[in-house]
Amino acid sequence: MSSVTPADAAELAEIVSRAAAEGAPLEIVAGGSKRGLGRFAPVARRLDISRLSGVIDYDPAELVLTARAATPLAEIAALLAGQRQMLAFEPPDWTALLGGTGAPTLGGVLAVNQSGPRRLKAGAARDHLLGFAAVNGLGQIWKAGARVVKNVTGYDMAKLQAGAFGTLSVLTEVSVKVLPRPETELTLLWPVADARAAVARMSAALNTPHEVSGAAYLPARGVVALRLEGPAPSVAHRAAALGGERLDEAASAALWHDIGAVLPVLGAHAEIWRLNPEPAAAPAVLAALHAHFPEGAAFLDWGGGLLWLGLPRANGGAVRTCLRGGHATLFAAPEDVRASADVFEPLPPPLAALTRRVKQGFDPLGILNPRRMYREF
Amino acid sequence: MILMPEPDATALARRAEIVSALRRIVPGEGVVDSETGLRAYECDALTAYRQMPMVAVLPSTTAQVAAVLSYCHENNIKVVPRGAGTSLSGGALPLADGVLLAMGKFNRVVEIDEANRCAVVQPGVTNLGISQAVKHLGLYYAPDPSSQIACTIGGNVAENSGGVHCLKYGLTTNNVLGVEIVTLEGEIIRLGGKHYDGPGYDLLGVVVGSEGMLGVVTEVTVRLLPIPPIARAVMIGFPSVEAAGDCVAAVIAAGIIPGGMEIMDKPAIAAAEAFVQAGYPLDVEALLIVELDGNEAEVDHLAAAVERIARAHGAVSVRTSASEEERLLFWAGRKAAFPAVGRLSPDYLCMDGTIPRKRIGEVLNRMKTMENEFGLRVANVFHAGDGNLHPLIMYDANIPGQLQAAEDFGAAILRLCVQMGGVLTGEHGVGIEKRDLMPEMFTQADMDQQQRLKCAFDDAGLLNPGKVFPMLCRCAELNRTHVHGDALRFPEIERF
Ligand SMILES: Cc1cc2nc3c(=O)[nH]c(=O)nc-3n(C[C@H](O)[C@H](O)[C@H](O)COP(=O)(O)OP(=O)(O)OC[C@H]3O[C@@H](n4cnc5c(N)ncnc54)[C@H](O)[C@@H]3O)c2cc1C
């Protein structure tokens, strides 16, 4: 295992360009906290981008922050908190879940499109990536988007880069949209009999104008949790309208941290899956999963649109047979399992072919994180 | 003057044969080839540019779209998709040697799914039509372009359209969950759906905003939101545009994200007031309308905060709407600003740059001095909350040289936006209008990377060519480059 650590984007481009000429693939690592995510496909050479760190520009009134890709998330969170602002997509703390050691970075969070409970209302990580600079698989420096919140100039490449797991280009600099932190929050808890009742309760609440910013079903506790955020008079008004047992600000914050972090709610398991069903179909999916894997544990976030599943042993992909519509990702599992399984949902043939052509458009020689997403490239 | 690619003589010579082949796919009135019939499609809302298409096709099923596209692919014929033709950037401008694919017959709401908070609609449904179809459930579709009565959701997807309320609720991209597209090769592909975040690359995310160049959208799944219980508008007059701009920044710095925040400058206020009598103050330099929506407790709380901030920033008049009628009246002038300016001038060009909010005052003042330089007047209405300007440049196409002067003025404004750290277009798209300005924002390498994405969807470069990029897509050449490793220099690239 060799490792190269460029000091800036120009050096990084040099390295990728040389790797492309030699046909020698690179594993892109920033903080290293998410190395356990995706297919396990070891690459001999590591491109360590951790020196591409530091905030470049942050103007709170513009709601935009620009930083080098490997800037630690903690540094950014602290800077934003000082101005009562935040990353609205609420990147969760997956350190324990992924067994990672390093510190998460902003670029890493975007590369895996890591969104937390507020995704339901505020959108995914990729919705907050406004612009970036990157190096493609040929070692060419390119950029897209900008540092303003509203822009449709050219294709929206930010959407594509976010969630590409570093397989299209290496992000070197990113501009993200930030938002004011809500003045206060509280959570309402509702006892529910089963998943059907839970999803019905969440769906009803989400269809009210009360701006629910978190909606989870925690079967082990037999409750639905609904989060309200905003100015104090507004939160009080909405809480009264919705009813339920209240968790105050601190307890609410702790609960949603745990829901985002998954393990505190789900417990440890040999295999953890992340399913994105159609929200209303979540009870049927849970029932099918329960019939298949009686020893499994599960809970719902995003009003039913996100299902976390823990299993005591490898299952050979049977999880996907329980899903109708939506998709499933093998999230946390031992290396040998991630080396052989389809970690990401296999795509129907025309979409798979298109996906491959897109990959070739950025990294035709297969230099960047090869086979991290799909067996074939 | 923007030039389009030279028409392909072979395609033109084969017109009769092409028309009859298309008639076999879409029978009856679905193929239009008469002069009078085609006249309806000769331009979009960028009316300075007109071109009759070779033929227009109005398919009504996805299978027909797929058959038309694969026929065009096999026969090397260009295709321009079209919704309602309200694009302000010339995105739907036909090509002399191209098929115009008009999606108006795709006008059905396919499914309303309350439990999943979404609706599945065909691309020819109007933006407002979606909200009307779900209103009885207390839901609506949030992005609200001023053209919402006419423009289609297919066009909104292609342009990633915004509206007054996208400051709080996002652009089209943040409100679309899935699409069905047909590629130029005739392949039908579904991206996203009723679930969150599809697997693999976010191809949905790049199809939105792709200006009809990656695929033809044949179905759209949109996110629905609950209608806010109440909304109030605060109408604030300022003695200078800088003060209005500063007030906008201060509202945001106070942690308030209003439903909408719009500024009009003096010429726009006068035009709008003369047109709809909304009760706008005529003695101010800038009018800011801040809309707050949500529950009553929140709206009252925030309206009071906005009023305080406005006074602290030198507001000379502050009025908060006391009733729904009054709120709509406040907006009536803003919403009618384009036609109001249209009454003052035979023609106008609507620009669409975005700048960092803190530069609003500076940019507006520079525009004032540019008026003399170009000999034309400008009225400004804009989405101040997100720094998206809409300078309306007034001209008269019948006076020789004025269209050119207006275009030059527009280009100068957009260059200024880019210099200020902004962009060429916030919501109207590049189309042909800003195509030749793309190098102001992007290097050749940036644009090559965008074109390589295009090649993955449309290798032949037949879908809406001549739009967005100042050079034609050259997929074969772009694909060849990697063979030479780092020897990636291009010969001087031919521009239009
Ligand atoms: C008075 C007025 C006010 C406006 N206000 C706003 C505003 O507030 N905000 C805003 O964002 N825009 C605004 N616009 C611009 C315009 O309405 C939008 O860009 C709108 O989305 C265009 O929709 P359309 O159906 O008219 O599309 P068209 O003009 O027909 O086409 C626009 C583009 O979409 C492509 N296209 C259309 N349908 C499809 C399809 N099914 N599949 C693939 N590609 C397709 C076309 O090829 C073209 O590139 C305004 C326009 C006018 C005239």
Image (cartoon, coloured by chain):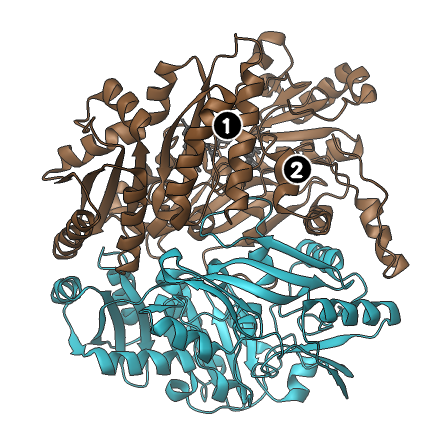
Chain colours: A cyan, B brown
Residue at the extreme right of the image, as rendered = B484
Q: Is residue B276 above or below residue A129?
A: above
Whether the residue carrying mark 1 lies under 8 Å from ligand 1 is answered with no
Q: Is residue A267 above or below residue B79?
A: below
**In this rendering, which labeled residue sits more in front, label 1 or label 2?**
1
Q: Quadrant of residue B348?
A: top left
Q: Quadrant of the C terminus of chain A?
A: bottom right
> How dense is the environment of label 2, judged by Cα within 10 Å: few (below 14), some, or many (20 and up)?
many
Determine the residue positioned at 65% across, 62% down: A134
Which residue, given by chain and number where applicable, does mark 1 sit on?
A: B104
Determine the residue positioned at 38% across, 66% down: A88
Tag of residue B66: 2
The percent position of residue B1, horizontal first and vertical second, equals 64, 22
Can residue B196 be seen here? The reply is no
Q: Chain of mark 1?
A: B
| Three-letter code for the amino acid on which mark 1 is drawn | Gly
- Between residue B133 and residue B43, name the one nearer to us: B43
Q: Secondary structure at mark 1?
A: loop
The percent position of residue B101, horizontal first and vertical second, equals 61, 28
- Between residue B301 and residue A239, name the one nearer to us: B301
| Residue at mark 1 to residue at mark 2: CA–CA distance | 16 Å
Can residue B485 be seen here? The reply is yes
| Three-letter code for the amino acid on which mark 2 is drawn | Ala
Q: Quadrant of residue B53?
A: top right
The percent position of residue B169, horizontal first and vertical second, equals 35, 51
Q: In the shown orientation, is residue A183 left or right of residue B147?
A: left
- Between residue B194 and residue B399, name the one nearer to us: B399
